[in-house]
Image (tube, grey):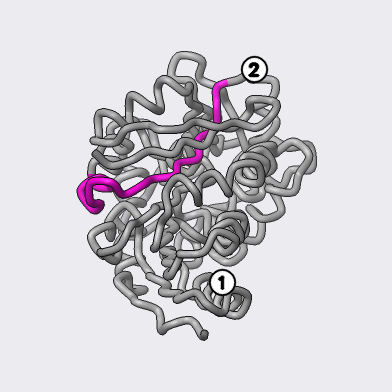
Amino acid sequence: MSAEPLEIYLEPQDLERGLRADVRAGLTAEAKWLPPKWFYDSRGSELFEEITRLPEYYPTRAERAVLASHADDVAALTGAKTLIELGSGSSEKTRLLLDAFTRRGGLGTFVPLDVSVSALLGSTAQIAADYPGLRVRGIVGDFTRQLDRLPTGGRRLVVFLGGTIGNLLPAERAEFLTAMRAALEVGDWLLLGTDLVKDPSVIVPAYDDAAGVTAEFNRNVLHVINRELGADFDPEAFAHVARWDPEREWIEMRLRATRPMRVRVLDLSVSFDAGEDLRTEVSAKFRPQGVAAELGAAGFTAAHFWTDPRGLFGVTLARAR
């Protein structure tokens, strides 16, 4: 069975408007910031795939280990007819779930949602070829805005992996989980991957690797803004910084100006002092009880929690109530 034509709810002009709005808001704030979603042009996606293979970057391996051990449990417990993946990318880890559902039988439809048309075209075609009995419906959309576009009917399992929820600030997480619950019916399921709180000596190197790949990934956001908005950032004039915040229990990635400079972007002239930081990512780390509490506040019941043998990464199976 071939993949169905992509359902497109996010056009290139929507992305450009979003980038413009984020750049204007973030670069005129007292403490400058940019959201991490703008890392991921084609080069940024390549760099992130490289990051996931680095020895310091444990989350991908740890989450894969959890799924390898418990994918059959997820299939048996949920009995899902439709599997929906948010921020799907290549859907590599999701294949562990697709394999488990194939062994069990009963899954009819796979729905990956991503902002990237090219990523979806490649992944949906490959998955349709590899799982010939499966209906594959790719949706081009933003998981923070297009949850109302998810297919309805049947018993659904929504999968949100990679610890991506940690990139949302607490109020944004609450808003997202509430919207996610509103998009589901009572009895539908959510499988959520969360990186766990641990010694900063393990966390920080994952965001500041010895080879400098994460530094290049971090600076890539400036290349994106230069290309898309005609800005004149000098990316090499910014140092990569990864900082653990013990109070908020999250890591921040920042770009630190190594000299005073003025940058032109849109109709703005943005000044940076030497040593001034531009925050580009927050990656929250979680405790199991905190995950359950946030899910509970949004209308879910955390039914099962699994982790890898080293306790680095957690996967929660929750049910809409």
Q: Is residue 278 visible?
A: no
In the drawing, does residue 218 fall left or right of residue 208? left
Q: Quick one: 228 or 194, which is closer to the camera?
A: 194
Q: Kindly give the residue lying farthest to the left in the view shown.
A: 182
Q: CA distance from mark 1 to mark 2?
A: 35 Å
Residue at (46, 65) in percent of width and height: 107
- Amino acid under disc 1: Ser
Q: Which class describes the residues within 10 Å of circle 1: few (<14), some (14-19), or many (20+)? A: many
Q: Secondary structure at mark 1?
A: helix
Number of marks present in the image shown: 2
Q: Is residue 255 above or below residue 225?
A: above
In magenta segment, residue 42: no
Nearer-N-terminus badge (1/2): 1
Check disc 2 and give the amino acid type. Answer: Asp
- Residue 71 x %, y %: 58, 48
The residue at 38%/38% (across/down) is: 318
Disc on res. 199: 2
Q: Residue furthest top?
A: 247
Is residue 180 visible in the rendered image? The answer is yes
Q: Quadrant of residue 253?
A: top right
Q: Which residues are magenta?
A: 179-197
**Is residue 203 rendered to the left or right of residue 318?**
right
Q: Residue at x 39, y 63 (%)?
A: 82
Q: Is residue 184 magenta?
A: yes
Residue at label 1?
123
Local packing at callout 2 (Cα closer than 10 Å; few below 14, some 14-19, many 20+) is few
